[in-house]
């Protein structure tokens, strides 16, 4: 471990600890557990951005204090770490303690200090993590975590004061027509309206107080916008198409509040889905003698839209926003993920926030089986050799965003397709050196493979940050920070923001050095492999195949990182994915084709 590469980030915290446990460790423990997880280093001192090892003198005492407090329900609400998460390391003859705090399961949230999740005193309550450090959660954030911890789906709740008269009959009839088209003999089609709605989960009975009425799911699925907002004041649906005409902000827009249609999520889905897919190129393909005008890309976009509606927390502000640009799709919804980003990308696990909405869509053929939606989207994008789907999660306000770019995943192509291409600070090179071949060699020798990939990412984005580079390289925040810091030092990037919220943008003088394609980017080693990629291939050779679990057990990498590595090898045509869900395996491509 190199102390010179240390830094504090959204998932790393350093604290001094000589012979006692720091009191503020529990705020960070709560914050990491309630956010995305993180690592605490005890015995490392920070001053003005510089780190030094102070060491932990009494390891046994501090470790005992840690476990005593973790297992004391009056100190902290839940112990979510195990023996393997507490590691003693030696740096320059001094001992430090590394504590890996995982993201807590939603059923354990909120993880809080003391005996009350609410923030009633200075050193108690519930914390989360952002770029500024640990912060106390608002009462609403805590209430939402408590609601998500319940195994009873929130959308099954029977709403007081709402009746079938608050629903849009045209929407319900359209739904029944789609169900009949999919399965004309379905027994529920013969039921009266109330019993039909009860069967699909739009109407419910509260047996504890002998009342019945429209459910949370029924109102959202079939209600009128005005009535929906009576129960969900933050409710808003927004579809936007970016125009190629710079004088127009949006070429096409659909919102739930324009008064021209019902405003419910059922009608929104069918108003938007065809607009999302209308410009996709459809190859000529015959299936049983009939032309098939549908592709995996069409299916992927339908999945992305359905997932957004199914997983939204409709009580959180800012509403659902779907954007379609010339070369991207963006799906953004309020709420947090109920599983980790790694689990979501890996597929096979599903934990829908709104199970009844999921069921209703699924009955009419919308939405894949549990846990396969993101997997299908990734496959479609990988097959097109486009940049892998980027899934991100933000807090305060809680929001999930899926970005699907229709841009080539090849680093060289990404660079060459931009007229203002990225280059090293060639002003340091002798002005007399203007032979193209020599300049190419200088350029290629100026950067590591990882740095070239970072620069390529920056060339197609207005700015980048530590998290986006982690997704690109499959490295942790500390490793990425070291790469970005080196590029800033070489005047490749300029930065904006402070602390953990730093954004990186290519320096103008670098972009202006060359305004034409003077570099032979074909010299980039497109198929060069990292050490981690080589280890995966070696393990496949040894074992015959690999899975995320095998990669975690044998190589010590996270599920999220393993999926990034697997996808990069699929993109290079080296391995193939077989199976689905928990049975997903990866084999060498030549072996799969035999």
Image (tube, rainbow, N blue to C red):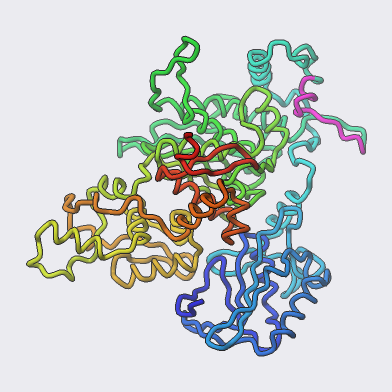
Q: Is residue 189 left or right of residue 6?
A: right
Tell me which residue sits at (75%, 71%) in the image.
124
Let me know if residue 76 is in the magenta part: no
Q: Quadrant of residue 96?
A: bottom right
Q: Quadrant of residue 442?
A: bottom left
Image coordinates of residue 346 in percent, x first then y, are 58, 46
Image coordinates of residue 75 in percent, x first then y, are 79, 73
Let me know if residue 201 is in the magenta part: yes
Image coordinates of residue 151 in percent, x first then y, are 78, 45
Image coordinates of residue 286 in percent, x first then y, are 44, 15
Tell me which residue sits at (35%, 71%) in the image.
486
Q: Which residues are magenta?
A: 196-208
Q: Is residue 331 left or right of residue 82?
A: left
In front: 469, or 195?
469
Tell me which residue sits at (91%, 35%) in the image.
207
In front: 408, or 502?
408
Q: Quadrant of residue 171?
A: top right
Q: Is residue 470 left or right of residue 552?
A: left
For residue 404, above or below residue 504: above
For residue 442, above or below residue 594: below
Count of numbered circles on the image:
0
């Amino acid at each position: 471990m190199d102390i010179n590469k240390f830094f504090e980030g959204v998932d790393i915290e350093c604290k001094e600890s000589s012979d006692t446990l720091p009191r503020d460790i529990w705020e960070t423990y709560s914050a990491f557990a309630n956010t995305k997880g993180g690592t605490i280093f005890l015995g490392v001192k920070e001053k003005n951005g510089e780190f030094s090892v102070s060491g932990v003198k009494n390891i046994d005492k501090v470790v005992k204090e840690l476990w005593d407090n973790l297992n004391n329900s009056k100190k902290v609400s839940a112990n979510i770490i195990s023996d393997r998460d507490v590691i003693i390391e030696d740096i320059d003859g001094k001992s430090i303690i590394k504590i890996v705090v995982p993201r807590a399961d939603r059923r354990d949230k909120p993880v809080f200090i003391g005996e009350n999740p609410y923030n009633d005193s200075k050193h108690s309550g519930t914390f989360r993590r952002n770029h500024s450090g640990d912060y106390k959660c608002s009462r609403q954030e805590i209430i939402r975590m408590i609601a998500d911890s319940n195994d009873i789906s929130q959308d099954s709740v029977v709403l007081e004061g709402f009746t079938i008269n608050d629903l849009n009959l045209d929407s319900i009839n359209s739904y029944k027509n789609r169900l009949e088209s999919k399965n004309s003999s379905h027994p529920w089609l013969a039921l009266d309206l109330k019993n039909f709605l009860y069967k699909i989960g739009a109407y419910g009975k509260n047996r504890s107080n002998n009342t019945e009425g429209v459910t949370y799911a029924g109102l959202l699925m079939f209600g009128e916008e005005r009535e929906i907002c009576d129960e969900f004041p933050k409710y808003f649906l927004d579809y936007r198409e970016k125009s190629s005409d710079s004088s127009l902000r949006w070429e096409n827009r659909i919102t739930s509040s324009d008064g021209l249609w019902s405003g419910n999520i059922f009608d929104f889905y069918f108003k938007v889905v065809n607009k999302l897919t209308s410009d996709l190129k459809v190859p000529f393909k015959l299936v049983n003698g009939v032309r098939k005008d549908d592709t995996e890309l069409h299916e992927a976009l339908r999945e992305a839209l359905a997932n957004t509606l199914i997983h939204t927390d409709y009580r959180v502000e800012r509403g659902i926003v779907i954007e379609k640009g010339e070369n991207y799709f963006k799906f953004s919804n309020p709420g947090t993920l109920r599983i980790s980003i790694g689990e979501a990308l890996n597929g096979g696990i599903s934990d829908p926030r709104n199970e009844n909405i999921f069921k209703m869509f699924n009955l009419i053929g919308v939405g894949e089986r549990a846990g396969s939606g993101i997997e299908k989207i990734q496959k479609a994008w990988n097959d097109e050799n486009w940049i892998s789907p980027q899934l991100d999660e933000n807090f305060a306000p809680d929001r999930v965003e899926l970005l699907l770019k229709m841009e080539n995943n090849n680093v060289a192509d990404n660079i060459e397709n931009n007229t203002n291409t990225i280059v090293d600070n060639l002003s340091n090179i002798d002005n007399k050196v203007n032979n193209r071949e020599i300049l190419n060699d200088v350029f290629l020798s100026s950067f590591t493979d990882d740095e070239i990939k970072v620069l390529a990412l920056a060339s197609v984005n207005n700015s980048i940050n530590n998290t986006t580079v982690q997704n690109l390289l499959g490295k942790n925040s500390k490793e990425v920070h070291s790469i970005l810091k080196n590029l800033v030092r070489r005047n490749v990037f300029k930065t904006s923001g402070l602390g953990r919220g730093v954004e990186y943008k290519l320096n103008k003088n670098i972009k202006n050095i060359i305004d034409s394609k003077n570099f032979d980017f074909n010299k980039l080693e497109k198929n060069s492999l990292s050490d981690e990629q080589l280890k995966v291939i070696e393990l496949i050779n040894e074992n015959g195949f690999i899975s995320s679990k095998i990669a975690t057990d044998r190589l010590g990498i996270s599920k999220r990182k393993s999926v990034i590595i697997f996808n990069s090898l699929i993109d290079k045509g080296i391995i193939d994915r077989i199976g689905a869900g928990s049975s997903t395996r990866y084999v060498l491509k030549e072996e799969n084709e035999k």
